[in-house]
Image: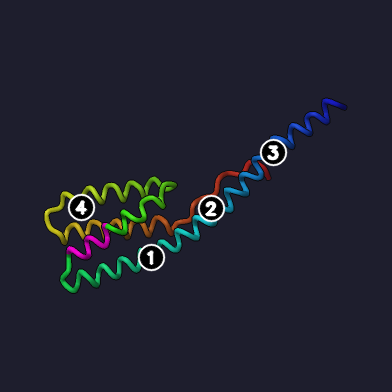
Amino acid sequence: MKVFLSLICLTLCIQTPFATSYEDIKSKSKQVMDLESKIATSLKEIINTGADIYNLGDVTGCYRLYQGALIVYKPFFNHRPKVQTIIAESMEKSKSAEKESDRAFILRTALDEIRTEILRPIKPPYNPIK
């Protein structure tokens, strides 16, 4: 009987932290998704504003707006390695572009890719406890 109770106690002790942490992760995933939705909306506004600036003839201003957005939002995506790669590669590629207009288009493409990526939901972790 003691062995049986010990096994039940051990099972509950093992399962409880996983159940709690899964619920915490699920809650945090929702918070992250809400934040990323707001960032996606902000990026859309940045893209549109940059296009307006570009069309008014201020190519450098457009480039700098897009560059600033990527610099500001980069720390928010530590949990998304693909987004980190998009940002790093586009920033490096834009530095080597000869024309300011090419730099702006490189970063605009990156912003579009990031929006597409963050609008995809993050898959919740596997919950072994049903």
Q: Residue at x 78, y 33 (%)?
A: 9
Query: Dot 3 corresponds to which residue?
Result: 15
Q: Would you say residue 63 sits in the magenta stretch?
A: yes
Q: Residue at x 49, y 57 (%)?
A: 33
Task: Give the x, y percent position of residue 65.
Answer: 26, 62
Q: Amino acid at mark 2?
A: Ser
Q: Are marks 2 and 1 in contact (CB under 8 Å)?
A: no
Q: Residue at x 17, y 68 (%)?
A: 58
Q: Are marks 1 and 4 in contact (CB under 8 Å)?
A: no
- Residue 32, relative to residue 22: is it above or below? below
Prevailing secondary structure class for the magenta stretch in the rendered image: helix
Task: Give the x, y percent position of residue 93.
Answer: 21, 49
Q: Quadrant of the N terminus?
A: top right
Q: Quadrant of the C terminus?
A: top right
Magenta segment = 60-67
Task: Give the x, y percent position of residue 70.
Answer: 31, 55
Q: Amino acid at mark 4?
A: Ser
Q: Would you say residue 45 sits in the magenta stretch?
A: no
Counting residues from the start of the chain, the first of labels 3 and 1 encountered is: 3
Query: Dot 1 corresponds to which residue?
Result: 42
Counting residues from the start of the chain, the first of labels 3 and 2 encountered is: 3
The foreground one among 127 and 55 is 55
Query: Dot 4 corresponds to which residue?
Result: 94
Counting residues from the start of the chain, the first of labels 3 and 4 encountered is: 3
- Residue 18, relative to residue 4: is it above or below? below
Position of residue 97 in the picture relative to residue 76 (left or right): left
